[in-house]
Amino acid sequence: MSNISLTKMFSASKLGEAMKDRTSLSQSGAYSQETFRYLIETESKRSERSGHLCQILFVYCTDAEGRIVQMDSHVAKTVMAALSRSLRETDYIGWYRDGRIVGAVLTVLVQESLAQVSTHFQPRLVEILRAELGFKETSRLQIRVCQHHELGGIES
């Protein structure tokens, strides 16, 4: 058996274990922080090998000083539902940071579609959230899209 096959089996096995664990999905249907971060790593590596790109979208609430704060459960459920309705089946939704940062891994993107995330998807998501949450709640929400190598700055 080749190293690649062993790696695939190990990765699939590890992912399978994470998926079997009932705590990997929250009540909202989003992946837990541990599972979601594993999916980010796996998808990023797959993207590099395949030549397709992936991006990670984050939604979080900030206070008056711009610090990331705990997300109200109603807001979190609304964000998760809006993302679920807006994304493709190949994309993943989960907690990047439990209770604070909701993330979505946008998979199998071609170079041309990277700009569409910012010009079409992000504004549409803001519009959906504003309609469901109102202006006051959405004014506290931040939406950021980045690639795997830019993840270091998300929690600062």
Image (spheres, helix red, strand yellow):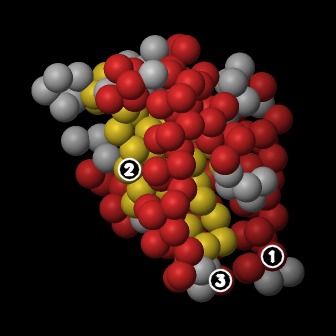
Res 84 quadrant in image: top right
* Residue type at numbered disc 1: Ser
Q: CA distance from mark 2 to mark 3?
A: 24 Å
Answer with the quarter of the image where residue 142 lies: top left
The amino acid at mark 2 is Arg
Q: Quadrant of residue 3?
A: bottom right
Question: Residue at the right extreme?
Answer: 1
Pair 2/3: label in front: 2
Q: Nearer the viewer, residue 89 or 19?
A: 89
* Mark 2 secondary-structure assignment: strand
Instruction: Say left or right for 6 vs 74.
Output: right
SS category of the residue bearing label 1: helix
Label ID, residue 144: 2
Query: What is the crowding at mark 3: few (fewer than 14 residues within 10 Å), some, or many (at least 20)?
Result: few
Within-10-Å neighbours for mark 2: few <14, some 14–19, many 20+: some
Which residue position is annotated with label 3? 50
Residue 120 percent across, percent down from the top left: 52, 60
Residue highlighted by disc 1? 5
15 or 121: nearer the viewer: 121
Relative to 132, residue 72 above or below: above
In this view, the mark in front (1 or 3): 3
Residue at 60% from the left image edge and 59% from the top image edge: 106
Question: Is there CB contact under 8 Å for labels 2 and 3?
Answer: no
Mark earlier in primary sequence (1, 3): 1
Check whether the beta carbons of the residues at disc 2 and disc 1 lie within 8 A of each other.
no
> From where the camera sits, is residue 49 visible?
no
> x%, y% of residue 40?
56, 55
- In the image, is 129 to the left or to the right of 156? right
* Tag 3 secondary structure: helix
Q: State which quarter of the image contains the N terminus.
A: bottom right
